[in-house]
Image: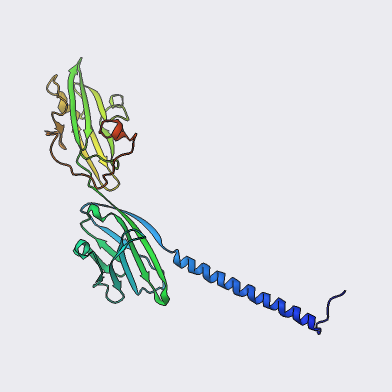
Amino acid sequence: MGPCSEDTPLCWASWLLAFSSLLLSVCSTGIKSSGAHGARVQDSASYVSLKGIRGGSVWFHVFKQPGTELQEIAWAFGPAIKYTVILRVHKGSEGTPTWVSLQDKYMQRVHVPNMTSLRIENLTCEDSGQYRARANFPGGMESNKIFDLTVYEPVPLPQILAKSVSTTGGWCNITLECRASGVTDDLNVTWESKDLPRELEPARNSWTLAVSLPLSPPNASLSCVVSNSQDQKTITTFLGEFCDYGEYNLLEGRGTVGAQGALGSEDSGLFSPPCLSAPPPPGHPLQESGGHIQLVSSLK
């Protein structure tokens, strides 16, 4: 049987059926496209990791798309399932945000200079956590930004312990140890040397350094550098100071070498507990070395 004639009722029915299918296909594509666009708006939350130091400050910034106009931004603190709105900033009243909660904790330390920025001063360890900025745009559009803030304790000033000093056979033998109280697993310790002949440099990967120098050495020095991701402290001792007075020994823990090479008390109370106080995992150098920090020498 050949193709049907266009003027028959059967052909008209077939044509209408094909046209209806085409319309349904177009509508379905439009709905899916709209749904996909809505999903992009819904999933537009971005994540930013921030780090601060106790006593310092931190900035939170929200970047809006060119041509968009913000109506309101709500700033909140806490995890996704249970966060607390701190304040809201409305268009035209950027200098006077509307406080919602947590005034006692933040009101004296939070500044809102404009619609898209917020600053927290005098950071404390309790400020660590997730902060959220929910921006509202005309037409009911929203975007979210998450800031994950970690506040670190300032790095403690390290001490260099002169565990033993002696002279034998025209050589000065020095054993030094770098220590920092309140040690946590976020601290890194390295050794740096200056004007020390390569063949006399101490062994790498050791937290206790044994050095042998001629009795008339150059003005060599060793520095202990303690750092975390936000802070760094360095203490330096000049090795020649230990070899000017002949053979003697310092008992372990008797004294420490200060920033200018002077001896001071080991129990000087210089250090505070860190913000990050979680115990190190089993097998961590802090547990395997009897509570001492594992040093990684970086000698120059």
In which quadrant of the rendered view does residue 195 lie? Answer: top left
- Is the residue 288 above or below the residue 230 in the image? above
Location of residue 272 by image quarter: top left
Name the residue at the right extreme: 1
Residue at image point 14% right, 34% down = 266
On screen, 49 above or below 194? below
Q: How is the image coloured?
A: rainbow
Left/right of residue 233 with respect to residue 29 in the rendered view: left
- Residue extending farthest to the bottom is 7
Residue 289 percent coordinates (x, y): 28, 30
Image point (21%, 37%), residue name: 180
Of the 4 image quadrants, the one containing the C terminus is top left
Q: Nearer the viewer, residue 80 or 131?
A: 80
In the image, 65 versus 251, the foreground residue is: 251
Q: Residue 274 placed where, x, y %?
A: 23, 45
Q: Is residue 245 above or below residue 78?
A: above
Give 216 or 246, whichever is nearer the viewer.
246
Outermost residue toward the front?
82
Quadrant of the rendered image containing residue 138: bottom left
Residue 220 in view, yes or no: no
Q: Give the mark count.
A: 0
Q: Quadrant of the N terminus?
A: bottom right
Does the rendering let one see residue 2? yes
| Image coordinates for residue 269, horizontal then vertical, percent | 13, 40
Q: Is residue 5 left or right of residue 90?
A: right
Q: Position of residue 86 (x, y in %)?
A: 27, 66
